[in-house]
Image (cartoon, coloured by chain):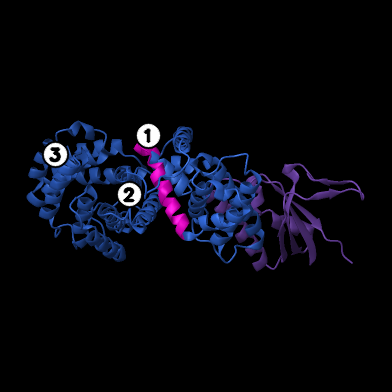
Amino acid sequence: MSEFLYLYRGGDSSGTPEQMQKHMQKWVDWLKDLGTKGHLKDQGNPLEPTGKVVKGRKAISDGPFAEAKDMIGGYTLVEAKDIAQAADLSAGCPIFDTGGFVEVRPIMKM
Amino acid sequence: MEPGDHLFRREAGRMVAALTRLFGVHNLDLAEDVVQDAFCRALEVWKLRGVPENPSAWLMATAKNRALDILRRERTARRYAPELGRLLESEWTLSPVVNEAFGAPAIRDDQLRMMFSCCHPQLPEVAQVALILHILCGFGVSEVAAAFLTRTAAMEKRVARGKKVLASSTRLFDLAEERELPRRLSAVQRALYLLFNEGYHGAHAQLAVRAELCREAMHLCDLLQEHPLSATPESYALAALMCLDAARLPARVDASGNLSSLYDQDRSLWDAALIAKGDELLDRSATGTRVSEYHIEAAIASVHARARTAESTHWDAIVGLYDTLLAIRPSPIVALNRAIAVAQLDGPARGLEEIAAIADRARLADYPFYFAALGELELRSGRRESAHEHFLSARSLARNPMERRFFQQRASACVA
C-alpha cells in the first residue's frame, strides 16, 4: 500500500439549509465508506480560506493563494494500491456535485 | 454523531430569530447572511472532521461569534435593534446582551415574535405562510415554491415583498406590548392552519413533502402553547386539530401506494399517541366563552378518531358539529362535508339533496372531491352510469397522479 494526499480544490457548497445538510452528509458517508474499506489514513482537515503568502522574508502578503475555483479547501490522507486506485477512489467524492475537484498526489517514499 | 433530520433547517429559524433581535428586523438580510456563513463553516469543518457532539450548540456559537464581530466592527456604521440601543455600544454590555439573545428562552420568544411579525396585516395570507416557512422553518425560496407548486420566480417576488414589509419596521412584534395582539394572534393561528392544511389536503404529489409541512405547522403551534400570551383556548384547539388529523396520516396511503379515503382506511394504522395528545389538548381548549372553528374541527376529528369503523361513527354528532362550523365560517367545502355526513346518517338521497342545496355550489366547480362526493352518492343510489361520469369529472380535475389514480379506480368500480 502507498499513501496519497487528496487536495480538495474549489467548489461552491452554498445552498438552502436542507441542501447543505444533505451535501455535508454525503461527505460524512463517503469518508466513512473509505474508512470501512481501509483506505483512510487520516481524515485530514479543512483549511481557512485566508492566511498569508510568504515569498522571501520581507515579501509577506495576505492571499489569495489561487483563484477561488482552484483554492484548496482541505485535505485527506488515504492509502491505496497505486495512483490509479487512489484516483478511482476519489471519484465518489461529493466535491464534484459543487463544481470542485480533487487533486491526488502520491506521498514520496523514504 | 449523526445530525437529526432537518437540523440545519430548524437551526436556521432559531439563529435568524436571535440575530434579528440583535440586528433589528430592518437588517434581516444581514441576519440571513450570518446564518448562511455559519452553515458554510459547519459544512467545511464537519464534512472532514465529523459532526460534533452538540451540533446545535456549535452552530449557535459560530453565529454568535460572527454577530459579535459584526456588532463590534460596524458599531457606528449601521443602526441595529433600537430597543437594545446603547447596550450594544459598550463592550461591558455587548457580550452579556449577545449571550442572552442566544439563550434558549430568548430564542423561543424571538421565534414567536418573528412568527407574529410575519403575519403582518399588509400581507396576504399566502405570503404570510410563505414567509413563515422561509424565515422560521428554514425552507429555501425554491423549496417553498415547490411545496406550494408555484414557480420559483413568483415565490421569490412574494418572499421579497414580504421581507420588505417586515423590514419597514425596525423591531419584532412584541406580544406583551401590542394592543393588536388578539387580532395578530388570530392571523398567526390562521397561517399555521393553512400551512397544516397545505400539507394535509394539498396538491403536492409527494406525501413526504406534505407530512413535512404538517410537522412544521405542529412544531410552530407548540411554540404558541409555550408562551402565556399566545396559549389561548384557540391555540390549544388548533394544536388538538393538528394532532387528531395528523394521527390519520399513516393510513392515508395503502400498501400499494394508493390514496385511501376515510371510509376505507385501515384504522389500526392511526397514531394512538397523537390521538391521545389531541384529545388532551381538546380538553385544555375547553375554557373561555368563545367557540372557534378550530374547536369544532378538532371535535369532528375527535369523533372520527373514536370510531372503530366508518359505519359506527357518530354521524349525528358530526352533522351537528358541521352545522355549528357553517355558522362560524360558512364555506361551500364545509357545506359539502356536512352533506357527506348527512348521507352517512340518512342515506345517499338526503346527501344529494343537501349538496344540491349548497348556495355557492358554483365555487366547487374545480374541486375534484366535489365530483367524487357526487359520484359516491350516485353509486350508492345504484345509478352507476351517472356515478361513472362524476368520477371521470373528478379525474379530470385531479391535482396529482395519486389523486388521478384514486378517481380512476372509483370510476372503474362503477362499470365493473
- The location of residue B221, given as percent across then percent down, is 35, 54
The residue singled out by tag 2 in the image is B200
Check residue B125 for magenta coloring: yes
Does the image show residue B379? no
Question: How far apart are the alpha carbons under marks 1 and 2?
Answer: 27 Å
Q: Residues within 10 Å of mark 3 (few under 14, many from 20)?
A: many
Check residue B85 for magenta coloring: no
Q: Nearer the viewer, mark 1 or mark 2?
A: 1
Q: Earlier in the sequence, mark 2 or mark 3?
A: 2
Using the rendered image, report if marks 1 and 2 lie on a common chain.
Answer: yes
The residue singled out by tag 1 in the image is B122
Q: A74 left or right of B43?
A: right
Colour that chain B carries in the picture? blue
Which kind of residue does numbered mark 2 sit on? Answer: Tyr
Frontmost residue, B270 versus B329: B329
Question: How far apart are the alpha carbons under marks 3 and 1?
Answer: 36 Å
Chain for colour purple: A
- The location of residue B161, given as percent across then percent down, is 45, 33
The magenta region covers: B105-127
